[in-house]
Amino acid sequence: MKRLLSHPVVRLFASMVVVQGSLFLSGTLLVRGLGVGLRGELALVSAFVGIGAQLGLMGLPVAVVYFVSSRRVPARRVLARIARVTVLQVGVVSLLAAGGLVVVGLTGESLTYPFIEPVFVVAGTLVFTGGALALAGVQGEQRFTALTLLQALPLLLYAVLVALLYFTHTGNGPLYLAASTVGWLAVPVLVWRILRRTRPDDDEGVVPSPPEVRSFGRNAALASASPTDLLGIDQVLIGSTLGHHALGLYVVGWAFETATVLPGAVLAGFVAPRVAAVPPSMAIRVAWTWVVRLAVVSIAVCLAVELVLAPLMVFAFGDGVRPGVGTARILVAAGVLLGMRRFLGVLLQSLGQPRWSTWAELASLLTMAAGVLVLGAAYGVHGAATAMGLAGLVGTVVQLVMLVRVGRLHPGLTTAGTG
């Protein structure tokens, strides 16, 4: 039992439970404090932050994990080499993302805080990208204890601050937005102190050049960003076509959907550097073992959540969200496929095939966008949620086929680093 509890996967899953609880708490208080409509608007703002961050990063966190793990070089040296260009790149993209929010506010439902929200998009994008790169360095060095704590830290602090604002009756849209960045500000500072402590087996390989890191990142950019469900593009489409209230119901359902997506995200954080570091002759077998384990865990979590979803959702969020129970049920089931798709993409990247994962994510993204627009117009928010399930199914099937193909091309894994 002691060995089991000390295993990195167990610790990461414990972190997942904490994260899920924090998301549920903060989401509940936000809906009760702001109402469904304004909560949907804040979700729209956060979606533009996510889009800006991932476009600015262009897959760099995945590249950092891959090169640090496979070449056994210090993460701080890789991060230092790409820092200058990354800061400039992210800064430009953050301004474009803020401009996108302004356009949506002018052409669709008006923004409640038309001057503050675009400023937050710029600041949030810069803060989040710094945290994402820092966590990639920790993950690449397989410092799983630190990764477990640091992944949970931003959402834990966010939940605490949201609770403080709610119970003191001082919360409003801008303050809740500001609360979401506090934890991410702390991550790079803490990570840099950790990465300064050199590991005994560091410097066994050659530090990759900036063009090499960026090339790998570009090939993995679309898949690593997971735009199908992670960037909030679905929320932008729903918010701009169905309105803030419909998006608010969708976001409430999303609070439950994360329970079935997080197992894939958590296991990816552990399995990715392990697969990249093992000899190619073992990599495929290790990958398939974890695919089966993830499927079992995700289905079990889905069944458990579905059993308690309806009464818990109404109890936590109030009677106003009752029309969204069906949407939440669809999203919880869709989360199994979305999480598996995300996990498979990380496996392909760890096997040195980032381009393959990107093609699969593109198929999933197109399915989601078309489905949200078509099914959303026909069946409202229920149809949009169904589109997410279809997107997860397409991405999962395509990447399973690709993983089989990687196994057949197994001898070439050692030279497929840029896919």
Image: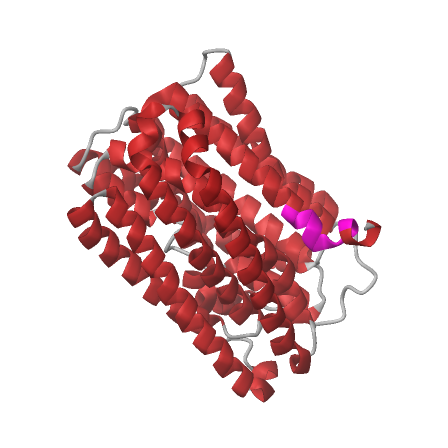
- Based on the displayed image, in which of its 4 quarters is residue 193 positioned? top right
Quick check: can you spot residue 185? no
Q: Which residue corresponds to the image point at 63% horizontal and 63% vertical from the top-left?
A: 271
Residue 112 % position (x, y): 27, 24
Residue 326 % position (x, y): 32, 41
- The main secondary structure of the magenta stretch is helix
- Based on the displayed image, in which of its 4 quarters is residue 205 positioned? bottom right
User: Is the residue 381 above or below the residue 26 in the image?
Assistant: below
Q: Which residue corresponds to the image point at 44% horizontal and 65% vertical from the top-left?
A: 218
Q: Is residue 384 located in the magenta-colored stretch of the structure?
A: no
Q: Nearer the viewer, residue 138 or 149?
A: 149
Q: Which residue corresponds to the image point at 80% horizontal and 65% vertical from the top-left?
A: 201
Image-based side of 48 in relation to 371, left or right: right
Residue 175 % position (x, y): 44, 22
Q: Nearer the viewer, residue 139 or 162?
A: 162
Q: Which residue corresponds to the image point at 40% horizontal and 35% vertical from the top-left?
A: 310
Q: Is residue 12 located in the magenta-colored stretch of the structure?
A: yes
Q: Which residues are magenta?
A: 5-13
